[in-house]
Image (cartoon, helix red, strand yellow):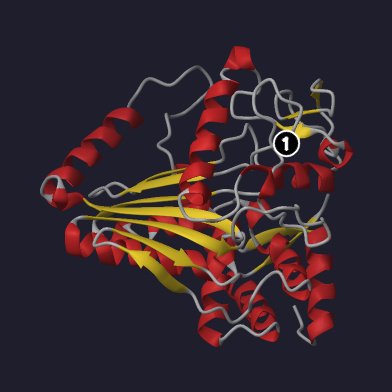
């Protein structure tokens, strides 16, 4: 399937204008755009501007508040609960992560759980906010139930990503950003657009049998936890996804398990929901709360250097550090532009026509 290349600034201006058209303030529109496009820059195309129409549809369905009163509803010196007032997660999450950072500045660490939010883009953006403060950043979120726990045919968990960002000295930061499923739902969407099958271990059909059909979820199938099946450790992926769900929602008062609101606005909301909106969880840890930051970063450089110098398997040039592919992709796309599938470009053009904005 062919692609079109767009300069970052062109997509930024367009996306920001769309967010302003649905009622976001200029500052919130800019923040939402920066978070959303960070996914495209880092090569996580499933969570970038391809989802812009989805956010607009949430707003049209009165499920996303363009002008939320995001606020702290409970706190201690090192913890807080934030209510996102049904705002865009692209705006709520940076607010909450900043609260965690501010608390860490005061007492060494900061931990913030969030209720009443929406999809927050990529976890990496929020965790990486801590890096410039010589802090370790942690970000996670629950998501709508598309994942069957090990041995289940029911969908009870989301893809529930986790990101941990760790500063280094001369070396680039260590950034581990991953879904707790074998593949994120957005990757299925990409395969659907390209008319390709999924690798084995990504999905199962409604009876629990392995499948390679990227449309399987539309027929009652499910994504699989990280590992794919019990023999390859899916119980570990299931456990990780459950931890994210509990930290993000049971702890904050958001919805959890099968009650998490779906991202597609056309999908009916669950009944008897026990909480408010989608939940997130953030952490910020000041490195010098443990040891001098310079010492830590020196040894992180040594750690990274040693792993990079590991003898690679045949056919590979070098062992990578988590965050390497995304960092290289970001540098390339800032210079060469961001490729969008024609189907995504056409969707954005139609969205722009709705609001009188030219892509």
The spot of residue 43 in percent (x, y) is 59, 51
Q: Residues within 10 Å of mark 1 (few under 14, many from 20)?
A: many
Q: Is residue 335 visible?
A: no
Q: Place residue 118 in its image quadrant.
A: bottom right
Relative to 85, residue 137 above or below: above
Give the left or right position of residue 62, taking residue 266 as reference.
left
Q: Which residue is mark 1?
A: 155
Q: Is residue 181 left or right of residue 244?
A: right
Task: Specify whether 171 is left or right of 339.
Answer: left
Q: Secondary structure at mark 1?
A: loop
Q: Quadrant of the C terminus?
A: bottom right
> Going by the picture, which residue comes out furthest to the right?
219
Q: Can residue 157 be seen by looking at this rendering?
A: yes
Q: Is residue 311 left or right of residue 192?
A: left
Foreground of the two, 210 or 352:
210
Q: Nearer the viewer, residue 280 or 18?
A: 280
The quadrant in which residue 68 appears is bottom right
Residue 100, compared with residue 201, is above or below; it is below
Residue 19, image x, y percentages: 65, 79
Name the residue: 69% across, 55% down. Answer: 261
């Amino acid at each position: 399937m062919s692609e079109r290349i767009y300069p970052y600034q062109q997509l930024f201006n367009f996306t920001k204008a769309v967010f302003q058209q649905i009622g976001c303030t200029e500052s919130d529109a800019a923040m939402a755009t920066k978070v959303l496009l960070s996914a495209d820059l880092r090569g996580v195309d499933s969570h970038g501007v391809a989802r812009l129409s989805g956010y607009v549809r949430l707003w049209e369905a009165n499920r996303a508040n363009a002008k939320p009163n995001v606020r702290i509803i409970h706190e201690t010196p090192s913890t807080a609960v934030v209510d996102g007032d049904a705002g865009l997660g692209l705006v709520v999450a940076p607010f909450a992560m900043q609260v965690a950072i501010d608390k860490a500045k005061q007492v060494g660490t900061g931990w913030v759980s969030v209720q009443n939010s929406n999809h927050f883009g990529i976890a990496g953006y929020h965790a990486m906010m801590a890096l410039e403060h010589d802090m370790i950043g942690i970000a996670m979120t629950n998501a709508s139930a598309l994942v069957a726990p090990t041995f289940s045919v029911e969908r009870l968990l989301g893809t529930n990503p986790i990101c941990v960002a760790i500063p280094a000295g001369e070396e680039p930061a260590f950034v581990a950003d991953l879904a707790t499923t074998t593949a994120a739902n957005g990757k299925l969407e990409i395969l659907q657009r390209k008319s390709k099958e999924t690798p084995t271990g990504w999905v199962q059909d409604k009876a629990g049998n392995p499948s390679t059909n990227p449309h399987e979820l539309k027929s009652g199938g499910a994504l699989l936890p990280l590992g794919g099946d019990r023999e390859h450790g899916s119980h570990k992926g299931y456990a990780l996804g459950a931890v994210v769900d509990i930290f993000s929602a049971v702890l904050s008062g958001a919805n959890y398990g099968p009650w998490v609101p779906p991202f597609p606005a056309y999908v009916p909301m669950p009944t008897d929901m026990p909480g408010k909106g989608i939940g997130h969880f953030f952490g910020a840890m000041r490195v010098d709360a443990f040891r001098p930051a310079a010492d830590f970063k020196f040894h992180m450089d040594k750690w990274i250097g040693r792993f990079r110098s590991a003898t690679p398997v045949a056919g590979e040039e070098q062992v990578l550090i988590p965050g390497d592919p995304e960092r290289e992709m970001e540098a390339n796309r800032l210079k060469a532009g961001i490729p969008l599938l024609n189907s995504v470009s056409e969707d954005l053009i139609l969205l722009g026509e709705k609001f009188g904005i030219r892509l």
